[in-house]
Amino acid sequence: MSINCIAVDDEPAALDLVVSYITQTSYLNLVGRYNNAIAALAEIHQNPQLNLVFLDIRMADLNGIELARIIGQSDKKNSLRIIFTTAYDQYALDGFKVDAMDYLVKPFSFVDFSRAAEKAKNYFAMFENSLQAAGMETKPAQQGRPYIYLKVEHQLVKIDVDDILYIEGLKDYVKVFLKSMDKPLLTLTSLKRLQEKLPPEMFLRLHRSFIVAAGAIKSATKTSVLVGQTTIAVSEQFKEDFNNFLSKWVL
């Protein structure tokens, strides 16, 4: 695997160091170096094969956080990832909010750099697998167990769809509750976007904040369902779909 990357830093010495680390890493392919984010943005727009940006934060004109937000709002959100390289650790929370893959604080060693690069390598390996498997995600059970990939803590995790109990939306994140795990998986996406990946015959939207697996429902009333030990209310917006579901239960 070869990961196409660029380095962006307005300090010449820092830029030289990152470039040298990249060239020493066999699976990283340097396609450009830039001393400002605006020039880097042009490369990002023009190069569809670009995978990874090693990005300083405090720069003139356009800073690294702002550039990361631009990328996060584009169609490159999943295919282009960012590793911040900065002398200021106070931006770590901002880095998390823009979904950076890693956050390296200067001065960092080649060992630290390699650890971050390895995260990128693992991510893109799983990302490629997910793209290849995308057409299989909603195939019927007789053609193989349906599954989806969730991004959890900078890696893609394969989830069997029939392992899902229910899903709770939390603004920019969702919690996915599984039969096989005590704690839910937290992933950065919207409930609507995740619902589009799920087989519609297997899941039911009951509330603006909840999707439940139809097969996991233990009991139901006119206003709620019991999934595992959790009671989930049915909102007025989804009453019609829920009543249609209930009609299939009535003998």
Image (cartoon, rainbow, N blue to C red):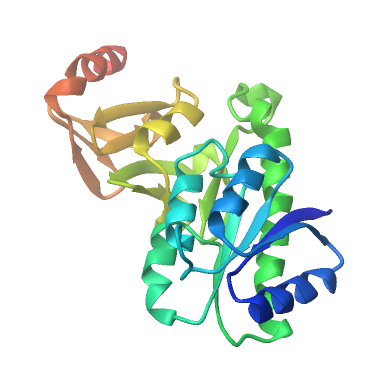
Residue in the picture at 26% in, 50% down: 229
Position in image of residue 201 (x %, y %): 45, 20
Q: Nearer the viewer, residue 9 or 173?
A: 9
Does residue 124 appear anywhere in the picture? yes
Specify the quadrant that holds the C terminus. Answer: top left
Relative to 245, residue 88 above or below: below
Residue in the picture at 73% in, 76% down: 16
Relative to 206, is 66 on the left or the right? right
Does residue 79 appear anywhere in the picture? no
Relative to 251, residue 94 above or below: below
Q: How many marks?
A: 0
Quarter location, residue 34: bottom right
Residue in the picture at 34% in, 26% down: 204
Q: Nearer the viewer, residue 140 or 251?
A: 140
Relative to 237, is 67 on the left or the right? right
Position in image of residue 52 (x %, y %): 66, 56
Residue in the picture at 72% in, 84% down: 111
Q: Nearer the viewer, residue 87 or 103?
A: 87
Position in image of residue 230 (x %, y %): 24, 48
Position in image of residue 57 (x %, y %): 48, 68
Quarter location, residue 61: bottom left
